[in-house]
Image (cartoon, helix red, strand yellow):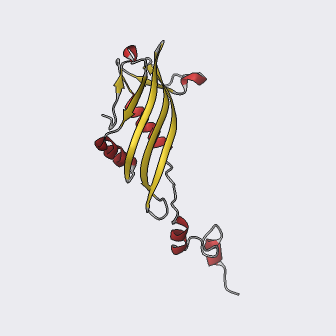
Amino acid sequence: MSEFSRTYDPRMLPGTAVELAASEAERAALAKRFGLVRIDRMEATIELVREAAGASAKGRLTADIVQSCAVSGEDLPVAIDEPVNLHFVPARAASAPDEEIELEAEELDEIEFTGSLFDLGEELAQTLALAIDPYAVGPNAEEARRKAGLLDKDTSGPFAALAALKKPD
């Protein structure tokens, strides 16, 4: 079960934009899943439209997260604002393992679902995960590098190991 499940039946879409917001418990579970310090806010405004086969979901996902700096480990607040353009389609029949499948360009962003419901919430959670910079650095990253000796060109870099092998004259 997804930490942020919001299921819809493509045959019974509301016909208007839907406002989705993660609860405190959902944000805590998602933060744990994505290795974040915390998620302060996660909201989306999505226009759901029924299509011949399935549904499309277009709109924006916004979130305020706190992640650890990749260098210093300090808390780093980040604002996320991502466009959403998803297409949910019923699952196709399984193909043979060795069968070659060709996809058209418009099929590349399709998300298959089984049964009569698709989970928009889980796809928004995955959209958030893709928007997170895994190597984000904070304002004190350079100082942390300097303290660790990573900025000294003589002791770091591609030729540092070779310099250590050099015989003294």
Up-down relation of residue 164 to residue 98 (above or below): below
Q: Is residue 96 left or right of residue 6?
A: right
Up-down relation of residue 164 to residue 132 (above or below): below
Q: Give the image location of residue 67, x and y in percent.
A: 43, 54
Q: How many marks?
A: 0
Q: Is residue 100 left or right of residue 30?
A: right
In the rendered image, the residue lying farthest to the right is 169
Look at 49% across and 34% down and name the residue there.
60
Image quadrant assignment for residue 157:
bottom right
Q: Is residue 27 left or right of residue 82?
A: left
In the rendered image, the residue lying farthest to the left is 25
Q: Quadrant of the N terminus?
A: top left
Look at 56% across and 70% down and name the residue there.
150
Decide if residue 72 is in sight here: yes
Q: Give the image location of residue 36, x and y in percent.
A: 39, 51
Q: Give the image location of residue 59, x and y in percent.
A: 49, 30
Image quadrant assignment for residue 168:
bottom right
Q: Give the image location of residue 5, x and y in percent.
A: 33, 32
Closest to the observer, 87 or 75: 75
